[in-house]
């Protein structure tokens, strides 16, 4: 774990201040420090990682994320981590997703052809439609190039951007038209049940297919092109290894401090423009700086940490009114038993119905508990892949329910100021009973001999990350908030950059890590081109 540094002198100057030690902040900070910049990361929590974390309960190590891409030989994150000297060991998970429906049980792994064949076997009249759908998706994925997000661009990238409309017309068309994933499904696939199955992993992005940008879904699937992986020892190991790379390069951590304000001053010369000048924190500290990179929530960054006078009313309105991604409810279980054979190493999605809208309507109820027979959920037994996460012969199991309302039973019974009293505990435990019953309907013998458990609600995620409404992926990945329509890496305010889930690539570990690269490259004026 990152060591707490001595609180810097009041007003001490740093080349860059990183607000938040999530994946984007850690990567950006480590890259800037390695490039010789004087950098400080300010983190409210007592450890780095943000959502990329794990924690121990009675000998079990519970994981917050599930799987990540880009960590295969020569993969984008592998190249990035090698550059930083991060030596985290990763283990491949294959197959990494399994979709269970009333009449279908289909797995997705690193062999995309095997996945396509499974879909064709399950929906035989749709064979040609499936071929056309995957061909169209592959065409778009070729155009999803992180180099197009670089600011500034190198000369070669500028030439590529000029040729982009010719080289990737379908991808550009989806971007301009704001195509949802549902529209793509409707265009190529004729079976409604097949459409639902193909869109199953949308919770990894935070919006249902009829709201979700087609480019976001295709980008997420592309991130698993070389398979899915987990860090051996748990996700906190990855966060700590990145934190060590940062401090080894000379970076400074300020843990247990919350950034409360980003101050600005007039830029030098005959201009009315302003630039960042310092960051204030609680407990009381103040650091001067030339650059601020925010890995904090987008609404908090632009609407709370900075004065509104720094941005146009149009920009602020877009941030203020933009929808946020979903949140959810998770039960972490430590069980004194091994899971039954047949449970996939990766994430198992269990769907009681092919009618996704009806399912989400049930998820969205706020004044009563949902019907367990109508809940969709996902499972992952992390200890199947990494047996170091549980004692011998025992199991760590996660049960996740997506799209749970933040305002369920009026914010889960939390008291004013976020105090989690008896009412909160009562509602949380009762909801967990409903979710457990949903699991038992599908897997009667899966849950038992529970020795440790922990429950996370939207209030939990809000408390630990300060994310608005406890959302998992910041701004919802709808067409109006995808790629270049998201903020970053630069912002309208001189010296202010953004990284993490709010930035151009969206949510998830893979995207957040690469957003750290894009932000650092922008601060360094294009010096990191070789890492793309």
Image (cartoon, rainbow, N blue to C red):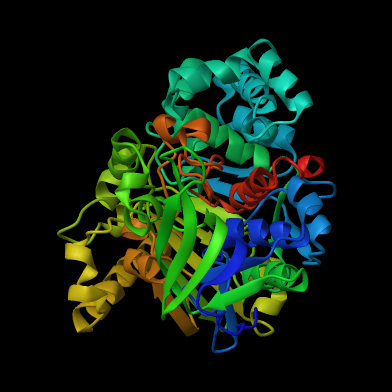
Check the image and report above or below for 293 versus 85. Answer: above
Check the image and report above or below for 318 versus 54. Answer: above
Q: Residue furthest front?
A: 270
Question: On the picture, is 49 further left or further right than 486?
Answer: right
For the C terminus, give its image quadrant.
Answer: top right
Look at 40% across and 42% down and name the residue there: 476
Q: Is residue 66 visible?
A: no
Judge by depth and name the residue closer to the eye, 166 or 186: 166
Using the rendered view, name the quadrant where residue 354 is placed: top left
Can you give x and y, in whole percent of width and height, for residue 369 in the image?
22, 62
Q: Residue furthest top?
A: 166
Q: Residue furthest bottom?
A: 58
Can you give x and y, in whole percent of width and height, for residue 238 in the image?
68, 67
Look at 52% across and 80% down and name the residue there: 46
For the N terminus, give its image quadrant.
Answer: bottom right
Judge by depth and name the residue closer to the eye, 37 or 175: 37
Q: Is residue 98 visible?
A: yes
Can you give x and y, in whole percent of width and height, for residue 360 in the image?
31, 45
Q: How many marks?
A: 0
Check the image and report above or below for 327 versus 531. Answer: below
Question: On the picture, is 273 further left or further right than 434?
Answer: right
Check the image and report above or below for 221 versus 377. Answer: above
Look at 44% across and 27% down and name the residue there: 180
Q: Residue furthest left?
A: 367
């Amino acid at each position: 774990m990152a060591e707490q540094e001595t609180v810097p002198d009041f007003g001490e100057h740093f080349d860059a201040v990183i607000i938040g030690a999530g994946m984007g902040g850690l990567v950006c900070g480590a890259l800037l420090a390695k490039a010789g910049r004087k950098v400080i990361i300010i983190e409210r929590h007592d450890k780095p990682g943000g959502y990329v974390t794990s924690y121990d309960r009675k000998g079990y190590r519970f994981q917050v994320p599930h799987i990540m891409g880009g960590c295969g030989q020569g993969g984008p994150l592998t190249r990035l981590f090698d550059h930083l000297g991060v030596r985290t060991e990763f283990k491949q998970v294959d197959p990494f997703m399994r979709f269970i429906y009333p009449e279908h049980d289909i797995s997705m792994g690193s062999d995309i052809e095997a996945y396509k064949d499974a879909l064709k076997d399950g929906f035989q009249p749709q064979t040609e439609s499936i071929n056309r759908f995957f061909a169209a998706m592959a065409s778009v994925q070729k155009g999803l190039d992180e180099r197009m997000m670089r600011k500034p661009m190198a000369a070669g990238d500028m030439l590529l951007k000029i040729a982009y409309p010719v080289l990737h017309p379908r991808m550009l068309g989806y971007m301009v038209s704001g195509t949802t994933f549902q529209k793509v499904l409707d265009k190529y696939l004729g079976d409604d049940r097949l459409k639902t199955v193909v869109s199953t992993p949308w919770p990894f992005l935070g919006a249902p297919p009829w709201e979700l940008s087609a480019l976001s879904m295709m980008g997420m699937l592309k991130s698993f092109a070389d398979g899915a992986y987990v860090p051996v020892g748990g996700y906190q190991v990855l966060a700590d290894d990145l934190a060590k790379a940062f401090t080894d390069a000379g970076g400074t951590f300020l843990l247990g401090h919350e950034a409360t304000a980003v101050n600005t001053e007039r830029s030098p010369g005959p201009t009315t423009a302003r630039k960042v000048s310092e960051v204030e924190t609680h407990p009381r500290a103040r650091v001067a700086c030339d650059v601020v990179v925010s890995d904090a929530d987008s609404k908090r960054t632009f609407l709370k940490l900075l004065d509104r006078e720094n941005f146009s009313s149009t920009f602020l309105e877009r941030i203020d009114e933009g929808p946020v991604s979903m949140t959810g409810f998770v039960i972490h279980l430590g069980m004194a038993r091994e899971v039954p054979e047949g449970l996939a190493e990766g994430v198992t999605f269990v769907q009681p119905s092919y009618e996704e809208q009806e399912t989400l309507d049930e998820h969205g109820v706020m004044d009563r508990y949902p019907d367990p027979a109508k809940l969709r959920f996902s499972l992952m037994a992390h200890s199947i892949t990494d047996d170091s996460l549980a004692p011998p012969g025992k199991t760590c199991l996660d049960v996740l329910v997506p799209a749970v309302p933040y305002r369920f039973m009026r914010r889960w019974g939390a008291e004013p100021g976020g105090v989690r009293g008896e009412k909160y505990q009562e509602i949380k435990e009762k909801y967990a009973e409903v979710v457990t019953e949903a699991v038992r309907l599908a897997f009667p013998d899966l849950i038992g001999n529970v020795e440790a458990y922990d429950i996370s609600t939207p209030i939990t995620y809000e408390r630990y990350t300060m994310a608005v409404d406890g959302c998992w992926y910041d701004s919802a990945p709808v067409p109006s908030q995808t790629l270049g329509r998201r903020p970053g890496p630069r912002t309208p305010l001189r010296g202010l950059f953004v990284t993490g889930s709010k930035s151009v690539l969206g949510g998830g570990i893979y995207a957040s890590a690469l957003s750290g690269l894009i932000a650092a490259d922008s601060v360094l004026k294009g010096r990191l081109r070789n890492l793309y």
